[in-house]
Amino acid sequence: MSLKDKKVSTKQTLNKKNNVIVADGVGSYEKHPFFIKKAAAAKALLSKVGLPKQLAKKIHP
Amino acid sequence: MFSEDKYLYNTNSSFLDFEFESIGPKGVIKKVARFSEIGTNIYNFGFGDLHEVTGEISDTVVSNNGDGDKVLITVASIIYDFTSIYAGAAVFIQGTTPSRTRRYQIGINKFWRQISLVFEVLGLKNEKWERFRQGQNYDAFLGRRKAFFFISNSF
């Protein structure tokens, strides 16, 4: 099961934490150009320098 | 994890997107963060100020809102919460400029006693990863919860 398929138990988390609130008003920034650009830059850097051995080959093409 | 003063923050059900408000002399500044998956269980941590009218996000504006430490602790807490949900995830962090990266480094140094109990942190130096050492300058950071991190000492 990939992380994307993982069901997040927000109720459980809220019971344990008091500084984070799950709110309907928080949208997804997945498609925001800022974060797309940042993710691309991170990928480029990691592709260049590589990852620690245990994480190698895990960068998405 | 961090008992110091921090902002309350909101997230959505994905636990990938986070928002909070910095409140200070310059007013209320909305901060947004997102963990973008860039590899298998590897996430880039992006963070910036959201302009609520234009929708633009910037990580180059210097807010000067007098709450730098509080913002930093809030960011650390967000990363902690994220890694509570996404167990085993490695988080990549790099500032948009060397000075921003240094700001993260100062934060890691400042709270190293707490961070090192929970996170294994690597620093990128001269294009090589090494275990984070206080007093060293790094170009980027990679962190993961200790229970899930690199067991060997091969790097």
Image (tube, coloured by chain):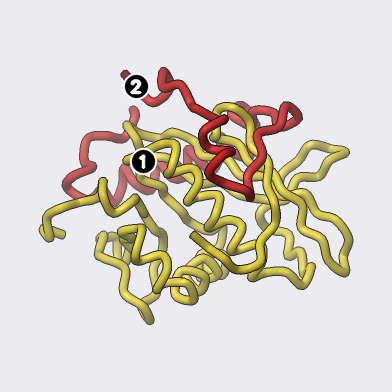
Chain colours: A red, B yellow
Instruction: Find out whether the residues at labels 2 and 1 contact each other: C-beta distance under 8 Å.
Output: no
Looking at the figure, which quarter contains the C terminus of chain B? Answer: bottom left
- Residue located 71% across and 32% down the image: A23
Residue A26 in which image quadrant: top right
Residue B140 in which image quadrant: bottom left
B32 left or right of A15 in image: right
Of residues A53 and A14, the one nearer the viewer is A14
Of residues B90 and B112, the one nearer the viewer is B112
Q: Residue furthest bottom?
A: B135
Q: Residues within 10 Å of mark 1 (few under 14, many from 20)?
A: many
Q: Identity of the amino acid at label 1?
A: Ala
Task: Say which chain tag 1 marks.
Answer: B
Residue B84: x and y in percent read 43, 43
- Residue topped by disc 1: B89
Residue B24: x and y in percent read 83, 66
Residue B66: x and y in percent read 77, 72
Task: Say which chain tag 2 marks.
Answer: A
- Residue located 26% across and 46% down the image: B148
User: Residue A47 — which label?
Assistant: none
Secondary structure state at the residue bearing disc 1:
loop
- Residue topped by disc 2: A2
Q: Residues within 10 Å of mark 2 (few under 14, many from 20)?
A: few
Q: Is residue A33 above or below residue B74?
A: above
Of residues B71 and A39, the one nearer the viewer is B71
Q: Residue furthest front?
A: A15
B78 left or right of B25 in image: left
